[in-house]
Amino acid sequence: MLKPYSVVLLLGLTGGVGFNAVAVPELATVGEGSYRYLFWQLYDARLATQSGQFESYTQSTPLLLELTYKRDISKQQFIDATVDEWQKLGQSSKEQQQQWAQQLQSLWQDVKEGDTLAALLLADGRVRFYLNGAETGVLDDTAFGAAFFDIWLHPDTSAPKLRRQLIAIN
């Protein structure tokens, strides 16, 4: 089911200093799902592109992944889980993972139940992050985008059911 979303003007504070407005292109939902770990629902996820279809990272940008949390999760827990997933996938080096984890320390914050963390993969490979609609920053390393989105979209993801829901495979 495709749901077109009109152009959204995200207004928020960037890094706590200054006022920033960022226009997000019109995006259509590719798929949605929930991630559960044992008995707990951790978050709802939505993947969106301009066409409402996911082909590949290069053909589907801008690509938006939104995670709406059902539980409180600390920034450090989220970063640790991200690094664990990178290690399981084996698509990036330990050095890259450590460098990215360090950069995420300044871009991410603790999330509370109901918060939405969004990542927008841009055509140039950079990833722009948002928390509840406010931009928290951009990670400029072009290798990061695919590595980050692979956590949910790689065929070897640790959440294959969620992957199928996000990319609309039955």
Image (tube, grey):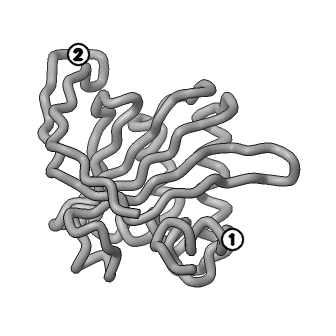
Residue 57 seen from this side: yes
* Residue 72 % position (x, y): 67, 28
Disc on res. 17: 2
Residue at 41% x, 54% y is 65
Question: Is residue 50 toward the left or the right of residue 154 in the image?
Answer: left
Quadrant for the N terminus, please: bottom left
Residue at 69% x, 71% y is 158
Report the front residue among 33 and 99. Answer: 33
Report the front residue among 101 and 73. Answer: 73
**Neighbours of disc 1 within 10 Å: few (<14), some (14-19), many (20+):** some
Secondary structure type for disc 1: loop
Q: Is residue 106 above or below residue 125?
A: above
Residue at 24% x, 78% y is 58
Give the image quarter of residue 162: bottom right
Mark 2–mark 1 distance (CA, rounded to whole Å): 37 Å
Report the front residue among 143 and 37. Answer: 37
* Furthest residue in direction front, as rendered: 1
Counting residues from the start of the chain, the first of labels 2 and 1 encountered is: 2
Instruction: Identify the amino acid type marked 2.
Output: Val
Report the front residue among 151 and 65. Answer: 65
Give the image quarter of residue 18: top left
Residue 140 seen from this side: no
Looking at the image, is mark 2 or mark 1 nearer the viewer?
A: 1
On the image, numbered disc 1 is attached to which residue?
158
* Residue 118 % position (x, y): 39, 44
Instruction: Identify the amino acid type marked 1.
Output: Ser
* Residue 97 % position (x, y): 52, 63
